[in-house]
Image: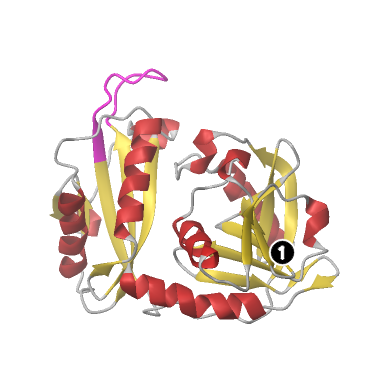
Amino acid sequence: MINLDGKLVEKKNAQISVHNRGFAYGDSVFETIRVINGKIMFWEDHYFRLMASMRIMRMEIPASFSPEFLEQEIKDLIEANDLLNSPARIRFAVYRIQGGYYTPATREIGYVINAEALENAFYILNEEDYEIELFKDHYVTSGLLSTIKSNNRAVNVLGSIYASENSYDNCLLLNEKKSVVEALNGNLFVVKGKTIKTPPLSDGVLNGIIRKQLINILKKTEELEVEEASVSPFELQKADELFITNIAVGIQPVSKYRKKEFTNEVARQLIGKLNTQARLG
């Protein structure tokens, strides 16, 4: 089942127009959400990021879009797909209603929510080999638009093809200033000694949910110091550890970048704290 504009419909009957603005112009934003046994992880963060993304895109937010209403929409879909007692991944997409060309005919929106089962209830650290490289063919533009989850993901798609063609597990993206911004599918953390650095939002970094949670966790961890600052490619090979974060996997350690191999001690330490925070949040 899929939620299409508030109605539960069979997947085979869930259709949108070829003139849908999300398809035609990338005029759409979305959230990837993790639900465990009917509980939405970090729901407040997801809700406020979605509202902020819609405002940035100048979409008209319906009066009905309260946290309680959208939460119930997700839970009803989970139940309809028999996922109430298991882990699930939700994609909540909002698009501007069709009409107009570059200039929309309206700022009103439609939405679609779909759900799929996940294998693990909580985050498990993947300690298998995970090699990354820089993707330098195209750049992320620093600024507010790059911080939201929109359908305009051409750089991520091309970077993913590059990674696949060259047998890398992931790639890191650069902005126009040649600073390292993030991975293809998540935020980057760089560990050097007791300091953990992650690029700032002003560099064009996605405003990641797990990124925010880890920054808060690290601020409360006395033996570690967190810093939001630009990262140069040169720093990567000098680091003790690199890891990538997103809502689907939690924390993904990097084992190799070029000739440098990394440990995953800090990632292993943080995954437990992240799971604890997920239970609370």
* Rendered image coloring scheme: secondary structure
Left or right: 258 as drawn, with respect to 103: right
Tell me where residue 162 sits by quadrant: bottom right
- Which residue occupies 29% across, 57% down? 114
The region drawn magenta spans 97-110
- Which residue occupies 32% across, 37% down? 95
- Which residue occupies 49% across, 48% down? 207
Which sits in the foreground, 13 or 187?
Answer: 187
Residue 259: x and y in percent read: 86, 69
Most frequent secondary structure within the magenta stretch = loop
Left or right: 198 as drawn, with respect to 27: right
Residue 159: x and y in percent read: 65, 51
Which residue, as the protein is rendered here, is positioned at the far front? 222
Q: Does any portion of residue 126 appear in the rendered image?
A: no
Question: Does residue 32 lie above or below 139 as drawn?
Answer: below
Q: Secondary structure at mark 1?
A: strand
Left or right: 240 as drawn, with respect to 220: right
Left or right: 55 as drawn, with respect to 269: left
Which residue, as the protein is rendered here, is positioned at the far right? 259
Tell me where residue 84 sits by quadrant: bottom left
Q: Amino acid at mark 1?
A: Ile
Rendered-image quadrant of the N terminus: bottom left
Question: Does residue 166 lie above or below 229 as drawn?
Answer: below
Residue 60: x and y in percent read: 26, 29
Circle 1: is it few (<14), some (14-19), or many (20+) Cα within 10 Å?
Answer: some
